[in-house]
Every structure is written in C-alpha cells, then in structure tokens.
Amino acid sequence: MYLKFLELHGFKSFPDKIRLTFDEGMTAVVGPNGSGKSNIGDAVRWVLGEQSTKELRGKSMEDVIFSGTATRKPVGFASVTLTIDNSDHALADPETEVAVTRRLYRNGDSEYLINGKNVRLKDVNELFMDTGLGRDGYAIIGQGRIAEIVGAKSNERRDIFEEAAGVSKFRYKKQEAERKLSAAQENLLRLNDIASELEGRIGPLKVQSEKAERFLVLAEERKQLEISVWIHRLTALTEQMQSLSDRCLVLTAEYENLQNDIAREEEKLQLAFRDMQQATMDIEQLQAAVVNAEQENANLIAGIAVCENEIRHSTEAVEAYRQQQQTLSQSAAGWEQKLAEQDAYLSELLQRQQTLEQELKEALAELQKADALFADAESHMQAEDAALQKLVLQQSEERVRLQSAEHDHREALEQVRKAKEESVSLAERLRQYALQEKSLQKQCEQLEQTRIELQNRTEGFSRLSAGKEKKYQQAVETLTELNAEYRQVQQKQRILKDLEQSMEGYAGSVRQVLKVAGSGRLGGVYGTVAQLITVEPRYGTAIETALGGALQNLVVENEDAAKRCIRYLKEMRGGRATFLPLTTIRGGMLREDLRELDGFVAIACDLVGFDDRYRSVMENLLGRIVVAEDIDSATLIAKKFGYRFRIVTLDGQVIHSGGSFTGGSAARSAGVITRKHEMEEAERKLRSMETQQQEARIAAEKAKAEWDKLKADLEGARALIAENDELHNELRRQLAQLQATAEADARMQETDAQRQERLQARADQLLAACEEAKNRLAALDAQISAGEVLRNESRSHRSDLDAQRSAYTEKISACRIRRAELLKDLETEQHNRLIMAQSMESSEEQKQALEEQIRQAKEHIAQKEREKQTLELTQQDNRKKIEGSQDETRRLRALHEEKERYTHLLRKGIDELKDAREKQSGERSRAEERLANARKEIDDLVFRLQESYEMTRSEAEATAKPITDIRETEAALTTVKNRIRVLGSVNVAAIDEYREVSERFTFLSAQMKDIEQAKTELERLIEQLTEDMCRIFRESFDQINRYFGEIFHELFGGGSASLSLTDPEHILESGIEISVAPPGKVIRNLIALSGGEQSFVAICIYFAILKLRPAPFCILDEIDAALDEVNVRKYAQYLKRFIDHTQFVVITHRRSAMEEANVLYGVTMQEDGVSRLLRLDQNGMAMAE
C-alpha cells in the first residue's frame, strides 16, 4: 500500500484544482515561509478525518475553504481526495485502489466519500485503524507532535504507542462493548424498576380479582331477582292503568256535554252583545252627524265672511291699477326724446372711425419701405463680420501653437534641470544604500537574539500549561461522576413520571375515563381516590393496603356525572369502574376510643390529607379502619373490640372484621401512593445534585479558564516567534531588494550625461519654433484691426435705418390704440340706445298688463257674489238635518236599555253551567293523574331494566321467573344486596388487570434474563479484549524500547535511551516515561535538553515506531526545523533506510533533506494568497497538474 495521488480544490491557498503525484521513496515539498507548503500536510490530515481546527491552524472549520483575494472571488467549497494503491489489500476494502474524499461547503454541509460512495466519518476512521494513518497515528508528524511527545505528561504519550502496537482496534472494540454493556445495565435497571412495580401489584390485584368474581356471581343473582320483581310490578301497574283509562273516557264525555251547553248559551250572549254594540254605534254615528252638521254650519258662516272680504279687496285693486296706467303714459314720452339724441351722437363716432383707418394705412406703407432698406444694411454687415471672424480664428490657432511651443520649451528646460538634480540625488542614494544595508544586517542579528529569548519563554509556558491541564482534567472527572449519578437518578425519576403519566397501575376503564375527563368531554370527574389524597411515606403501605382496589375508585360530583361516565364506558366497551358521587356517599367514623391502647397509631382517615369536600368519601372508605404498629398490637385491639372493624398494620398485615387475617412477606411496593413518594424523593435528590454539579462546573470552568489563559500565553509566545521569523525574512528580503536597487542606480548613473545632452538640443529647437509663431501672429493682428474699422461704419448706417423703422412703428401703434378706443366708445353708445328702446317697449307692455289685471279683478268680484248666495242656501238645509238626527238618537237609547236586561239573565245561567263543569274537570284530573303516575312508574321500571341490564320489557318478561309470594322474593333480593354491600368496594376491572399484569411480569422477567445473559457475554468479551491488549502492548512496547535505544545510540554517536511504564501493574492506563543520556551528559529531565536535542529524541522515538510497524506512507511537516545542519543530514540519511517499506513526503526548507529526496515539489505564491506548485525530478522541471 502506498500514496499515489493527492488532489486539492478550494482548500486553503489552493483555489484551483491541483494534483500531486507521489512516487515510491522520498518526496520533498519546499518553499519560502507563507507560501502554503504546510497546507499540503493539513490537507492530508483533513481528508483523514481531523476535527480539530487548532491542528488545522484555523479558528473554524470554514477557514479551510479558500476565502478569496483582492483579484479572486471566494470559492463555495473545499475538496481533498487521497488516492491509495491497495493492491496488497492492507486496507479492509476489496478495491485495489482506494480514493478517500472529504468535502466541506460554505453553508456548513460536509460529506465523506470512499471510492465515490458517501460514508460516515466513523467508516473512514475504521478503514485506517491500526495502519498508523488513524486519528492518533504516527503517519502525519508536524513540529507540534514533536514538541508534544517530549513535553507532554507521561500519561499523554500513550496514543501514539497504542497505534504503533496495533491495539487501537482492540480498544475501539472494547469501547463499543463497554457502551453496549452500559446500555444493557441501563435497560436492566429500567426493566427491574418496572418489574418491581408490577410485582408489588400482583398480590393486591389477585385479592381484588377473587373478590370481583364473587361480586359478579352475586350481581347475577341480584339481576334475576330484580328483573322478576320489576316484571311482577309492571304487570300489576298495566292492569291498574287499563281501569283508570276507562274511567277517564267516561268523565271526558260528561265534561264535553257540559262544554257544549256553555258554548250554546255564550253564543246567545254574544248575539245580544252584538245588538247592544250596534245600537251604541248607531247612536254615536248620529251624534257625530249632528256635530259634523253644526261644524259645517260654522264653516259656511266663515266662508260667507271670506267672500265678502275678497270682494272688498278686489274693488280696491281695480282703483290702484288705473293710477299705475296714468304714470306709465307720462314715462313713454320722455324715452322718445332720448333716442333721437343718441342716434345723432352715433353718427359722429362713425365719421371719426373712417378718418383713423386712412391714417393707419399710410403709416404701414412707409414702414414697409424702411424695413427693405434695413435688411440690405444688415446683410452687408454680416458679410463683414464673417470675414473678421475668420481672421480672429486664425489668430487664436496661431496663439495656441505659440503657447504649446513655449510650454514644450519650458518642459524641456525643466527636464534638463531635473536630470542634473537626479544625477546629484543618485550619488546621494548610493551612499544611503550602503548605510541602510549595514542597518538591516544589524536588525537581523537582533531578531536572531529575540527568537532565542521567545523560545525560552515558550518552554516555560508549556510546563505551566501542563500543570493547569491536569487540574482541569481532575475537575472534569469529578463533574463527569456527578453527571453520571445525576443521569441515573434522573432516569429513575423519568421512569416514575412515565408510569404516573401513563397511569400505570390503574385499570384500563379508569384510565379511559380520566383521559376523556381531562379533555373536557366528561364533566364532574374529580379524579381517583389515589390522586385526591396525600400520605406520609411511613404510612404509605398501610393506606395502600387499607384502600386496596378502592384507590382506583373515581370520585365524581353527583349521580348524573356517574351515570354519564357509565354510559360512556358502555358505549366505548371500555370495561367497568366504580364511581363515588359526593351527593350519595355518606361517611362514618369509629366511635370507640382507641387512643390509650398500645400499638394504636390512628384511624386510617386521619392519616391522609385531602380537600374537605371529599371528607364523606374518605370517611366512607377509611373511617372504620384502624392503623396499628404491628400484628401483635393489631391482634390485641381486635380481640378487645370483638373483631368488629378492620385493622391494618404499618407493614401491610390485615385483620378483617369477623376475625380473618391477611398477611405475609411484603413485596417491593411500587403502588400509586408509593410511586408519589419515590418521585418526591428523586426530585429532592436531583435538586441537591444540581447544586453539587453547579459547584463542580464552576471549579472546572475556573481550572479551564486558568488553563486557557496559559494556552493563550503559550500561543501568544509562539505567535511572537512566528512574527519574529516573518520579520526576519522580511528584513532579508528588503536587504536583497536594496542591493538590487543600488546596482540598478549605479548603471543609471553611467547613462545620465548622454540623456542631459539630448534634452538640451530639444530645448534649443523649441525656442526657434516660438519666434516663428510670434511673427505670424503680428501679421494677423494688423489684418484684424482694418476689418474692425469697416465693420463699425456698417454698424452706424444700420442704426440710422433702425431709428426710422422705430418712428413709423410708434406712429402705427398710436393709430391702432385710438382706433381701439373709438370702437369701444361706439360699442358702448350702441348698447345704451338698445337699452333705451327696450325700456320704452317695456312701459307699453306694462300698460297692457294692468288693463288685463283690471278685467280679471272685475270677474273675481262677480264670482264671489255667486259663491256667497250658494253658501247661504246650504246653511238652511243643515239646520233641518240636525233636528232629524236628534229624534233618531232618542229611539236607539231606549232599545239599548232593553238588551242590557236580557244579557244579565244569560250570564247567570252560564255561571251555573261552568260550576258544574269545574267539578267534573277536577274528578277527571285526579283520574288522569293516577293514570300518569302508573304510566311513569312503568316507564321508570322499563328504563331501569334498560339502564341496569340493557334489556327491553319483552326480553325481561322472557327472562323473569313467576312470583307466587312477592314479599318472600323481595326479602331474598334484600339479602343478596346486603351480601354485596358486605363485600365493600369492588374493582371488577381487577380481573382483566390481574391477567394483564401477570402476563407482562412474565414477559419482563424473560427479557431481564436475556439481558443478564447478554451482559455476561459482554463482560467476558471485555475481559478477553483487555488481556489481548495487555499482551500485544507489552510485546510491542518492549520492541519499541529496544529499537529506541539502538537508534538513539547511533544518531547521537553514543549515550543511552530507554522507555519505561510508570505503572507496570496497570499497563493499559500506565503513563510512559522517556529517559535519555547523550554522550558525556547526565540528564534527569528532558526539559534540560536543548530544543534541537529534544526534537532529535522525538525523531528517534518515531524512527523506533516505524522500525517496528512501518506506516505505508508518512508526512513529515518541518520536524527538522530545530535541528542543526549535521543532525539534519543524519535525519535525512536515516529516513532512506525506511523507504523500502514506507513512502515519505517531507515538508522542509533544509538543504540536506532536499538532497536526499527523489522528487521535489516547490510551492510559490506568485499571486497574493494563491499557491502554485513546481515539480523537479531527474528529468528536469515541469508544472504539476
């Protein structure tokens, strides 16, 4: 197996897709600091599943995606593919070539692929386990790993040795087995809790089940007797109802006859009433007619007066109209004179208008002649302006040429001056370059000294950080133990809560009712007896025993609520349950005084807490039960009172009323009351442990903060070293750049004199060009002056003509204004004449209208005279009608009095008939009431049959037995009911519940047995794996120790070195100590070694591991940085010994290491932030793909 290819795309500084091809032997990756060569080693770590951003030299995993530069956009994902030749099938994969790919997208999504198929990180880890390429393997070694193996604590060096020994896979299998074992133990604990709870219920449920079976036998007997009694009563009631029904029919017929007689008399009374009402209405109509006639007379008198008034007013209006006619005749004569005067004035205005029109026509003709002369002068002046403008344009162009030549001449002179100054400056710069070179060399020496000081400080921080880390790990272990204990208690509490929420221990019918009541569909349900009481833990067993199945009885508001629940269970076929309505249950307490008796604890009712509204229920269930200390005390109390009541001991033994005993060994209780106590105890313990957890968490956080601070200091020191190195490199680069600049300036000094001569010659040529341009400009100035004189003469002639045009224009405007004013006056006077004519015509029309009004007024006077005569005749007729109406009214009043006497006699007869009817109605109502009572009793009995036994009457009659003596049958029924009452509260659901619990307990027991067997097998597997790991690790460790001593002696040129276990008795947990003694030195602590010696010791250990268990390939990332040149050569030459079994990729900048490589990859950063690759081998140089 060996590494074939490495493909990167978008990873860190490699935005473009590149491919590195690796040959057998050693490949070196070289390049300056910051070029990105270590990113290749990071890529291999990353694709093999590295999760630590610190190991990948970033703050977050997103930092591995190329983030862009000033000229490149960021990419959306990073992808690395590692292709391995697996022809020897060293990897557990059937393919001869295995390609492992890891991708990370900027949105946080990631994926792993093996040969293009999606897999888990776990699959990648398992693929490379025990190959040296695993998560804790030794195939990828950087400077940090070198420092860790030397500077780490003895117990922190185990990972790399376990990977080398090949026990990582065994440890993984052991951890998997331990995880399964832990899960099995948790499952066993949970099942054990549930089984304990079920075991505690089986005994009480068995007693309840037997009691319920006896109850069912008695209930069946009671059913047969009740049905027979009810059917016997139904038969008697049916016969009684038939007799009462016949009597009701007779009484109804008599009642209807009386009702008909009353109806006939009332009809006569109604007729009489109608006659009386008609007479009354006639009287009222006559009276109204008299009133109307009198009112009409009054209206007629008023109408006559109105007519007389209108006649008077019309006569007065005629006189007023005649006076207005005389006034209008006088006004018409004045208007005729005014019209004659207005016509004369209009004729004068028209004459003036014709004169103005002639003056305006003459002025317009003169203006037209002046406009023609002005246009000729304007055209001549424009031609002169165009010629002058052309000369000015030529002048401007020539002036621009002159300015350009003068500017070029000045620039040439300035260039000559600058060339001379630069020559002087160049000599000064060469002198300054020499001084700067000395300064930079001195700074480089100072940075070398600073790096040594920072390295010493880093080593001190590293030692302190190790101590703080140990303190933090101890705090974390304490917190982990508390968390584990907390989870156990929490799991127990969760199990108890699950049992409580699922109402485990309650019958299915009870659970069903509680669930429906909780949703609001069944009202009036308060809960079970167990839910409504509270009990101290020491009395829990006694109260559970005393209540037994009654714990599941449901307390409800009243009988209706109980019936609703029963109907629901019947409809849903949910089984049976016992209900305790608060309105029917009556409590009772023992009256005996037991307080002075030995062993007496209390009446059971006094040991429970409950709401006072449930007192009757609690007294009914517990009021006659005594709680005693033990069975002996209970026996003495029972004997003293003749076994009249039940006694329960604190440990659950029972003496029943009548003398029977129930008892034995107490099963582990997990009843509903005990479960409450366990939940409360778990809650208290959890609160206490939360406080302890908080304290441990604070201690761990404090230790972590101290450790983090030291790590930050350590990282800061390392960052300063990196900055120091970077600054050192920068200074060296500046020094090289300075030397190159000095050489360029020296060459520039040689060519400076020739450049000055060329610039001076150009300045002289530009000066001659300036003189020529000035001569041409003077000639153009003379031509422009002559043209301006001609243009001024033309402009003066045009101004004279323009003044003549203005005078004619003003004259025309004045004429037009006077014409407009004259037209306006003419229009106004014409309008005034029209108004005068209209006024005269209006006066004539008013005279004619007055004549018409006079005629109409005379006609109105005549009409009103006629109306007055008509009204006087109508008044005489009304007086005659009033006298006739008064006579008819007197006749009708006499008829009304006669009808009143007749109705009085009819009322008296009707009252006598109604009295007889009421007597008959009372007798019929009593018969109907007796009939309804019989029918209701029958309905009640039928309902009770349906409600109690779900039987119709016909079904019950078929089932009922004949009764010869009803009293004897009722006595037998009473006896059966008493026997049922003696049984007390019965939980019928206990029969099914007992069977279900027994079956579940048997199933859980079988499960627990299977888990116990699996647990034993896992423990045996863990023991075997531990033995194998100890054996393999011991053998491999001894071999590595021997190789380490040999390699150390060879590379150091003498001395000795060894590895040892800090705790040989516990080899799998033991730390590893490193002891070395270089030639001529006695070293007790590795810290006393120099940095280079420490690195060389670590390299010797890695070589020993590779010698024992060669990795297929190995990435060495600048592990030779701290070595001097002699040791680098030894290191590089020793690597050559492993190339037959191991393929090496060495990231380095040391010459000796490069010389030993078969292939070189050069990493450059020609573009900021983007790395490029060059490949160099024996055939020359070529770009990598």
Image: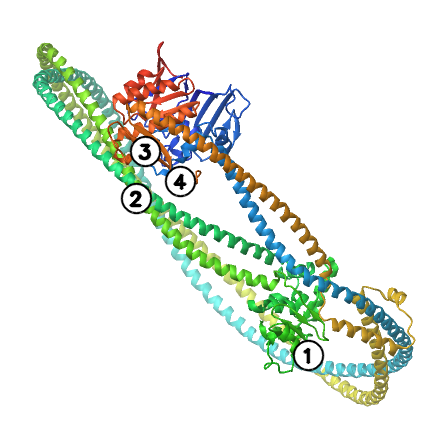
Q: CA distance from mark 4 to mark 2?
A: 32 Å
Binning the other alpha carbons within 10 Å of mark 3 as few (below 14), some (14 to 19) or many (20 upward) gives: some
Q: Can you say whether 392 is above or below 504 in the image? A: above
Q: Can you say whether 1057 is above or below 972 in the image? A: above
Nearer the camera: disc 4 or disc 2: 4
**SS for dot 4:** loop
Q: How is the image coloured?
A: rainbow
Residue receiving disc 1: 639
Where in the figure is residue 168, as x and y percent of width and height?
47, 33
Q: Can you say whether 167 is above or below 959 in the image? A: above
Q: Mark 1 vs mark 4: which is more N-terminal?
A: 1
Q: Mark 3 vs mark 4: which is more N-terminal?
A: 4
Q: Mark 4 vs mark 2: which is more N-terminal?
A: 2
Left or right, residue 1123 beside residue 632: left
Q: Mark 1 vs mark 2: which is more N-terminal?
A: 1
Residue receiving disc 2: 709
Residue receiving disc 4: 1063
Q: CA distance from mark 3 to mark 1?
A: 87 Å
Nearer the camera: disc 3 or disc 2: 3
Where in the figure is residue 1060, as x and y percent of width and height?
37, 35
Q: Mark 3 vs mark 2: which is more N-terminal?
A: 2
Left or right, residue 218 beside residue 1043: right
Q: Which mark is residue 551?
A: none
Residue receiving disc 3: 1075
Residue 473: image quadrant is top left
Give, as a three-letter code, the residue at label 4: Asp
